[in-house]
């Protein structure tokens, strides 16, 4: 069972709820101020289309943000334990004939 979500946890949901409220309020106001029912219906359909598109984009943005946060968190986790003798860095590998003037075969 998931814990109860608060309104502070879902800002995108708040935006969508306010947009849905506006989609219901705007046609009423338009009709009250003399716009035809047909004009109010067209305005309502347009507002619902814009609200639906914004909801899709907000949810996509949230998923992308969570995925990016997960990648950042995984990058912070060390990939392996490096012991005392295992120092990473160029030229510190055994058997490498790096830029030493004396080779092991001399």
Image: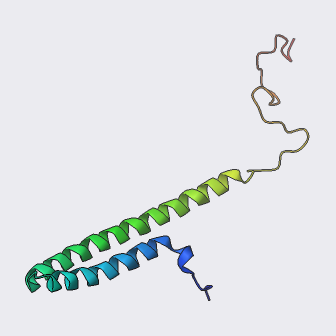
Q: Residue furthest right?
A: 84
Looking at this rendering, what residue extends furthest in the bottom direction?
1
Q: Nearer the viewer, residue 72 or 31?
A: 31
Residue 86 sits in which quadrant? top right
The quadrant of the image that shows the N terminus is bottom right
Indicate left or right for 21 with 6 as reference: left
Name the image colouring: rainbow
At 88% from the left and 44% from the top, the residue drawn is 83
Picture residue at 85% right of the left edge, 12% below the top = 102
Which residue: 21% across, 86% down?
28
Left or right position of 22 against 13: left
Give residue 66's quadrant in the image: bottom right
Out of 30 and 72, give the one closest to the viewer. Answer: 30
Relative side of 71 to 89, left or right? left
Q: Residue furthest front?
A: 33
User: Looking at the image, how many numbered discs can be counted on the residues?
Assistant: 0
Q: Position of residue 106 (x, y in %)?
A: 87, 11
- Residue 88 percent location from the top left of the image: 79, 36
Residue occupying image coordinates x 56% and y 74%: 9
To which quarter of the image does residue 69 belong? bottom right
Along the line of sight, the residue nearer the viewer: 46 or 33: 33
């Amino acid at each position: 069972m998931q814990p109860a979500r608060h309104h502070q946890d879902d800002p995108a949901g708040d935006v969508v709820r306010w947009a849905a409220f506006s989609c219901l309020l705007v046609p009423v106001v338009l009709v009250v101020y003399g716009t035809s029912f047909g004009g109010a219906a067209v305005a309502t359909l347009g507002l619902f289309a814009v609200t639906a598109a914004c909801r899709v984009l907000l949810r996509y943005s949230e998923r992308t943000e969570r995925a990016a946060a997960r990648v950042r968190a995984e990058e912070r986790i060390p990939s392996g334990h490096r012991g005392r003798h295992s120092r990473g860095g160029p030229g510190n590998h055994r058997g490498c004939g790096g830029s030493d003037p004396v080779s092991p075969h001399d």
